[in-house]
Image (cartoon, rainbow, N blue to C red):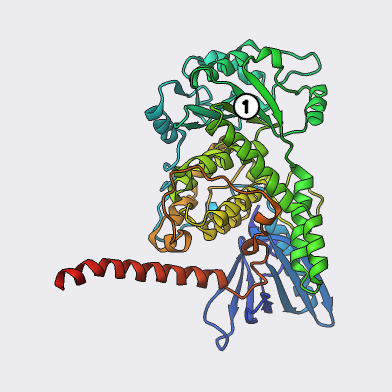
Amino acid sequence: MEFSELIYTGRAQAELLRGGEAPRLRGTLCVTGHHLLLSPEPQSTPDLWLLLLRSVDSVEKRVAGDSGTITLRCKDLRVLQLDIEGVETTLDIARSIEALSSLESVITSFPFFYRPKGLRLGDAWHFHPPERYYKRVARETTAWRLSEVNQDFSLCPSYPRAVIVPRTVDDDALARCARFRQGGRFPVLSYHHAPTGTVLLRSSQPLAGPQKKRCAEDEELLAAVLACGPPGARGFIVDTRSAQAAKQARLTGGGTEAKAAYPGWRRLHRPLERGRPLQESFMRLVKACGDTEQSMDLWLSRLESCHWLAHVKEALTTACLAAQGMEREGACILVHGTEGTDNTLLVTSLAQLILDPLSRTMTGFQELVEREWIQAGHPFQLRCAHSAFSHTRPKHEAPTFLLFLDCVWQLSRQFPLSLEFGEGLLLTLFEHAYASSFGTFLCNSEKERCLCEVRTRTHSLWSALNQAKEQRKLRNPLYVLNPLTIWPSVEPQSLRLWQGMFLRWSRPPESSEVVWEKVWQIVAEGEKTEGAQPTASASA
């Protein structure tokens, strides 16, 4: 298929309204295979306006007289309006945008064509392999090993090639464990907490079924986990489903770990919303934030009724439960729900941010996202197919990764000195998860990325973000290494709406960026003053 087949009209005269205080742009609008471009008239601005078509979530069109209007609602929550000369031209351009923004083929997406200056293919893809984290674990304990049992992805299509498992469990036992877990996601190490010697693991649900089947190798694996921990260690299985949902899952072949079969382990149910209810909560929140005419009472009522902050609270509470078990009770923690690719990753990644100072650094956070979300099999292509504006009924979409980023923002607000990165990085990750020029968030698993040759044919987002010119916008100028565990408050008065995300396009343009730059200037001036003091005293 050629892109030209989907471009019904490639050029038109148009006026662009970007909302807020941004000035109108009038000029020539062009449609390409991957972008919408507006070349402004000379008297307005010399800058070319560019929009990645993959970032369009919905297209609305209306015509009147001899002109038309196209409203583009984007995945990054922007709302753009194009006033176009000519009715047929308007309809043709709308059809072109609809077709090009919804292409399902991965290998025809823009990252496979993007070749930015200063970056080379292959750069930064080697930054965060499983082997890198294993080296850190190996320095802390010899009880775990790096297994390549999934080298060809035949054991578990959503796991990476290499996983960290107890040294006493061989690969044959792991293969049998995989057959007992949904999607082959047997328990693997997520994080080793060196101060207490405890571990955090993740998996999918066991396939116990109505007959309450058992797997000796799975039971031995979890027994080996306790043996790897401190003397007398016990374990908690944090199930992100309700007890009722877990019971119903047994009727369809799933279920939970039988208490008698896993001595030393205790199951805790901490239900977290997922799938369509979470997506609809996100959509209601965005709709409420986009209505600027409502009264304050109505606004607060709508904010509460969308339940988004309730989801934030439950996610942080469950992560704190897992972290508390490891830090204060010396327990090993296994987290799973049904598939183990959504809320499981939400809990394990947040628990690490709470416990691990290295995860709160710029490099450590990138590694956490890569290891606990991308390589761990979060299906980004399915979950981020649409944002909050799509007119289609949600199928596989769910803003689980956005919920994670919101929780991280809550941590940064409560502990403003403890995270080396700022809101800019979180917003950037949100944007690129839904639509990107880079290949980092493409596909649903490492297996799919290998089949599409993503690592050799696209650029990594991390290589772009780690360039010196980008770091100033992303780093927290107030950061001070905090070696302690950070325990967030989840009380209603402590959790805030993330305005930088949900109200970013209705605030004055670049307000947060301007404030951020001023903070950098203050810090820089303070460092200069401190550096000058010894010289002054010496001369005195």
Which residue reaches farthest top? Answer: 216
Q: Nearer the viewer, residue 129 or 71?
A: 129
Residue 367's place in the image compared with 30, above or below, is above
Which residue reaches farthest left? Answer: 539
- Position of 478 compared to 8: left or right? left
The percent position of residue 261, horizontal first and vertical second, equals 68, 13
Count of residue discs? 1
SS state under label 1: loop
The percent position of residue 167, horizontal first and vertical second, equals 46, 18
Residue in the picture at 42% in, 41% down: 126
The percent position of residue 133, horizontal first and vertical second, equals 44, 35
Name the residue carrying label 1: 185
Residue in the picture at 45% in, 32% down: 195
Which residue reaches farthest bottom? Answer: 43
Residue in the picture at 53% in, 33% down: 327
Q: Residues within 10 Å of mark 1 (few under 14, many from 20)?
A: many
Residue in the picture at 62% in, 21% down: 178
- Position of 369 compared to 283: left or right? left
At label 1, the amino acid type is Arg
Residue 536 visible in the current orientation = yes
Residue 13 visible in the current orientation = no
The percent position of residue 273, horizontal first and vertical second, equals 75, 42
Q: Quadrant of residue 203?
A: top right
Q: Quadrant of residue 336?
A: top right
- Position of 306 compared to 129: left or right? right
Q: In what quadrant of the picture does the C terminus appear?
A: bottom left
Residue 395's place in the image compared with 182, above or below, is below
